[in-house]
Image: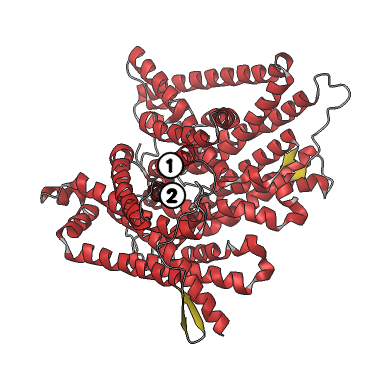
């Protein structure tokens, strides 16, 4: 039994990472109605920026902070240059453009930083906290703390600040938002910037665990999408729940289903998501969309 | 064109007015005659190519045709019905392995193995399409994304059948004794026959009332279903047919190259298919040929630029195409032609629009 709970705890640790990137996906989808397939690759660029700062002699904390700020700028610029012109085209166009961004970012990080694997230090100490017979690593606790901090500040932003309310207004009704004087384009850009910052944080959480290379986020972004889809891509709570479900089911299938082999174990959480979507196409937390003819 | 505009069809023109209906009919049969002439010339040119091309270029053209068949399948799903599928690599892989196993384990001949591959991937497509029929747009893209990333792990897991990461060698079909042009040309002709068959089938599939129903689904699902189109059934069929073409293409490519391995079936292949049909022209039959050329030549030229930049070339092409030429090469050309014709010949009945 103790083994089981230890696996669940480890699963929550990984799930927190999927959830943080999933939150970024939900944020972009809620503000601009776009599913950004390039989110993971943008997070990889952020991790490289931090690595660059650290190897230039900055302390890891400062390097990561600067990387997050730069990522926000990259997110805003990407929105204004690439995404804005196609924002109101059909879904297919948008999917193709963000897939193009995915390839472009992936290839730029390869072109600039090469394909060798690099390591990024963790901000969390290499310590373990023992509670009874459980062992909680500082890394795990830190990751969960970061996720909670992100969730809390997003809640605060969207419920309590004028900026958050302006963002929500722009997302829910562009015309009315413009009519009451909200700077619409700036809001959309801010949404992309914020999401890029969130993505950067998840990239910085992933980089110390895996090694940093241009394809680092390849599987993470798929799990993050799976997490976000549980909530219908529109629910922040759904993304957090989805991330935990994906992380825990992944840890449990690794622990208890060795006969599946490592190849199929990584697919199991995804199958779970497919089952959720087929049963409830709008996601567990999504609201049903009523369409007009 | 909006969703209810189902009457701009070949047969509906006579309802507009007597005179324009008659002239529309003339223009239509003229267009059809011209289309048939173009098709005959194209077939003659294609049939003559192995006589004048070196063996390696013949081999490359065979690759173009196999990719074009598979791209036609994705264009049916994405271009005609508007469903975004990122899982085309899966059906391409299913067709490839089905053909290889049919030949090595079941002892089927070349043509039998290709048809078997088509049947297997049709069933696979229906199996995916059936649960996916309720999902649209983004959700379908995500489900098929999961399908796309499952391909390589599945191939590796069932390595006793698929050869795992090392791949499988497949015998290429050998030319009979009387055939004087060598193996590459022989395979070229075999693939050409299947390619023409596939294009002819799909042309007929999208040309008639089914094609208009598909356009109806693309432009407005709810409107289409309220006009009596069985949207879910058609979507499943189209997914099955699209998957079947992917499987056919995969089988043809397998026999062209003589080797299959998991690295050929990654998510990048699906993105490549999507890029190719976008460049070729969504919702056009001939766009699939451009797509085949794109898939055969662009990746290898792009990788000449170095590992890092090939993705940027691909991504840049995708984004630029969406910005500058959202209808692709064929769509833009058709626009140009119809605009010039309009400028030349005054009013121009909707029916003389080229059948795609």
What colour scheme governs how the chains and residues are painted in the rendered image of this protein?
A: secondary structure
Identify the chain of the residue marked 1, using the numbered disc in the image.
Answer: A
Q: Can residue A117 be seen in this view?
A: yes
Q: Is mark 1 on a helix, strand or loop?
A: helix
> Which quadrant holds residue A150?
bottom left
**Residue B239: image location, x then y, percent:** 55, 48
Q: Closer to the camera, A183 or A229?
A: A183
Q: Can residue A25 be seen in this view?
A: no
The image shows a total of numbered marks equal to 2
Q: Verify CB contact (< 8 Å) between mark 2 and mark 1.
A: yes
> Callout 1: 10 Å neighbours few (<14), some, many (20+)?
many
Q: Are marks 2 and 1 on the same chain?
A: yes
Q: Closer to the camera, B6 or B60?
A: B60
**Residue B34: image location, x then y, percent:** 53, 18
Q: Which residue is farthest front? A: A57
Residue assigned mark 2: A44
Q: Closer to the camera, A2 or B62?
A: A2
Numbered label attached to residue A145: none
Between circles 2 and 1, the one closer to the viewer is: 2
**Residue A68: image location, x then y, percent:** 32, 52
Left or right of B268 in this view: B27: left
Residue assigned mark 1: A105
The span from disc 2 to disc 1 (Cα, nearest Å) is 9 Å
- Residue at horizontal 21%, vertical 55%? A167
Left or right of B235 in this view: A78: left
Q: Is mark 2 on a helix, strand or loop?
A: helix
- Residue at horizontal 49%, vertical 60%? A209
**Residue B62: image location, x then y, percent:** 68, 28
First of labels 2, 1 by sequence position? 2
């Amino acid at each position: 039994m103790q083994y089981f709970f230890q696996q669940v705890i480890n699963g929550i640790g990984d799930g927190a990472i999927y959830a943080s990137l999933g939150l970024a996906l939900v944020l972009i989808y809620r503000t601009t109605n776009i599913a950004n397939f390039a989110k993971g690759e943008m997070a990889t660029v952020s991790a490289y920026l931090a690595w660059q700062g650290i190897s230039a002699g900055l302390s890891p904390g400062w390097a990561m902070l600067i990387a997050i700020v730069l990522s926000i700028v990259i997110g805003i610029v990407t929105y204004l240059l690439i995404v804005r012109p196609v924002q109101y085209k059909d879904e297919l166009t948008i999917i193709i453009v963000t897939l193009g961004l995915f390839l472009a970012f992936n290839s730029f990080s390869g072109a600039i930083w090469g394909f060798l694997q690099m390591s990024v230090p963790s901000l969390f100490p290499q310590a373990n906290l023992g509670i009874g017979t459980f062992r909680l690593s500082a890394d795990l606790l830190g990751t969960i703390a970061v996720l909670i901090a992100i969730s809390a500040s997003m809640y605060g932003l969207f419920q309590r600040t004028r900026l958050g309310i302006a963002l929500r207004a722009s997302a829910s009704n562009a015309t009315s938002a413009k009519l009451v004087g909200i700077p619409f384009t700036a809001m959309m850009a801010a949404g992309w910037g914020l999401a890029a910052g969130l993505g950067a944080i998840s990239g910085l959480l992933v980089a110390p665990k895996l090694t940093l290379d241009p394809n680092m986020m390849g599987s993470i972004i798929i799990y993050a999408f799976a997490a976000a889809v549980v909530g219908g891509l529109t629910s922040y709570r759904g993304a957090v729940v989805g991330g935990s479900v994906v992380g825990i089911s992944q840890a449990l299938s690794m622990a208890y289903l060795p006969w599946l082999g490592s190849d199929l174990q990584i697919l199991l959480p995804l199958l779970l998501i497919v089952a959720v979507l087929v049963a409830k196409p709008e996601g567990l937390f999504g609201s049903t969309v009523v369409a007009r003819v | 064109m909006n969703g209810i505009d189902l009457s701009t069809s070949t047969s509906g023109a006579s309802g507009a007015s007597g005179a324009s209906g008659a002239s529309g009919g003339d223009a239509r049969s003229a267009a059809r005659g011209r289309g048939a002439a173009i098709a005959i010339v194209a077939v003659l040119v294609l049939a003559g190519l192995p006589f004048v091309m070196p063996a390696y270029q013949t081999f490359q053209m065979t690759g173009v045709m196999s990719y074009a068949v598979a791209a036609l399948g994705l264009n049916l799903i994405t271009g005609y019905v508007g469903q975004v599928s990122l899982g085309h690599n899966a059906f391409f892989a299913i067709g490839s392995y089905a053909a290889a196993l049919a030949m090595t384990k079941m002892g089927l001949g070349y043509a039998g193995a290709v048809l078997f591959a088509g049947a297997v991937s049709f069933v696979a497509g229906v199996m995916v399409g059936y649960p996916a029929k309720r999902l649209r747009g983004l959700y379908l893209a995500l489900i098929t994304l999961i399908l796309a990333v499952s391909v390589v792990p599945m191939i590796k897991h069932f390595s006793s059948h698929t050869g795992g990461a090392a791949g499988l060698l497949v015998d290429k079909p050998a030319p009979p004794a009387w055939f004087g042009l060598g193996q590459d040309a022989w395979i070229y002709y075999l693939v050409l026959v299947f390619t023409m068959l596939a294009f002819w089938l799909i042309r007929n599939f999208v040309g008639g009332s089914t094609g208009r129903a598909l356009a109806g689904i693309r432009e407005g699902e709810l409107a289409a279903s309220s006009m009596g189109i069985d949207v879910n059934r058609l979507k499943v069929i189209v997914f099955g047919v699209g998957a079947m073409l992917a499987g056919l293409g995969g089988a043809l490519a397998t026999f062209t190259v003589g080797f299959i391995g998991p690295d050929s079936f990654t998510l990048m292949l699906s993105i490549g298919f999507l890029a190719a049909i976008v460049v070729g022209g969504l919702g056009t039959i001939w766009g699939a040929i451009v797509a085949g050329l794109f898939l055969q030549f662009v990746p290898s030229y792009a990788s000449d630029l170095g590992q890092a930049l090939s993705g940027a070339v691909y991504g840049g092409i995708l984004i630029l195409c969406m910005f500058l030429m959202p209808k692709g090469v064929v769509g833009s050309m058709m626009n140009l032609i119809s605009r010039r014709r309009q400028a030349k010949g005054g009013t121009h009945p909707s029916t003389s629009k080229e059948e795609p």
